[in-house]
Image: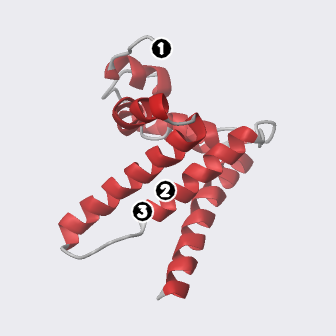
């Protein structure tokens, strides 16, 4: 069983600096974009959002489902919440983030399962891999939605 950790401790662990401290955003971007695989990209990206998703969605799902499925569903919930936020601002139906984040969740699971690592490459190459996974999955979802209608 994992020991409970506070939000402040979680953010410091992920960013290397305390919550709200100068350099927090820079560290998050440097660590996430420079991660050596897509699984670790998400360990560093937006630690505040990740903290709450891990405790409120991932952990409860992992009690009832295999970890791979809980991971994908956690990404789906995150996407749905992003879609909801955009819908509330635009006052129109939006369904982009849910399939996009679900696809990224699948990529995370596959990258972990098959140990896709680019950790040995320079930072800029690791960044390009991570951006390619994000941008490529968005393009696939957009293309798929354009085919549907």
* Secondary-structure class at tag 1: loop
User: Which residue is the site of mark 1?
Assistant: 2
Camera-nearest residue between 139 and 31: 139
Answer whether residue 23 is visible to the viewer in this image.
no
Residue 62 appears in the figure: yes
Distance (Cα) linking label 3 and label 1: 30 Å
Mark number displayed over residue 97: 3
The span from disc 1 to disc 2 (Cα, nearest Å) is: 26 Å
Decide: few, some or many residues near mark 1? Use Cα within 10 Å; few <14, some 14-19, many ≥20. few
Residue 134 rendering spot, x and y as whole percentages: 58, 58
Q: Can you give x and y, in whole percent of width and height, for residue 131 in the image?
A: 61, 56
Local crowd size for mark 2, using a 10 Å CA cut-off: few (<14), some (14–19), many (≥20): many
Q: Which residue is mark 2?
A: 101
Residue sticking out furthest to the right: 120
Q: Give the image location of residue 120, x and y in percent.
A: 81, 36
Dot 1 and dot 2 residues touching (CB under 8 Å): no
In the picture shown, does residue 6 fall above or below 133? above
Q: Position of residue 96 (x, y in %)?
A: 42, 69
Q: Which is more N-terminal, label 2 or label 1? A: 1
Instruction: Report the residue at 68% width, 54% height from top.
Output: 128
Does residue 148 lie above or below 112 as drawn?
Answer: below
Verify CB contact (< 8 Å) between mark 3 and mark 2: yes
| Dot placed on the residue nearer the N-terminal end, 3 or 1 | 1
The relative height of residue 93 versus residue 72 in the rendered view (above or below) is below
Under tag 3, what secondary structure?
A: helix
Q: Quadrant of residue 113?
A: top right
């Amino acid at each position: 069983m994992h020991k409970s950790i506070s939000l402040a401790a979680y953010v410091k662990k992920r960013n290397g600096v305390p919550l709200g401290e100068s350099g927090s955003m820079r560290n998050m971007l440097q660590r996430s974009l420079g991660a050596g695989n897509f699984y670790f990209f998400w360990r560093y990206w937006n630690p505040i959002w990740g903290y709450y998703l891990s405790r409120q969605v991932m952990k409860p799902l992992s009690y009832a489902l295999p970890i791979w499925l809980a991971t994908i569903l956690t990404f789906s919930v995150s996407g749905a919440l992003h879609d909801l936020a955009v819908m509330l601002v635009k006052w129109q139906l939006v369904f982009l983030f849910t399939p996009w984040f679900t696809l990224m969740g699948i990529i995370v699971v596959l990258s972990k399962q098959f140990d896709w690592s680019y950790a040995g490459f320079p930072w800029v190459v690791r960044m390009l891999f991570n951006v390619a996974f994000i941008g490529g999955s968005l393009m696939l979802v957009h293309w798929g939605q354009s085919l549907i209608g």
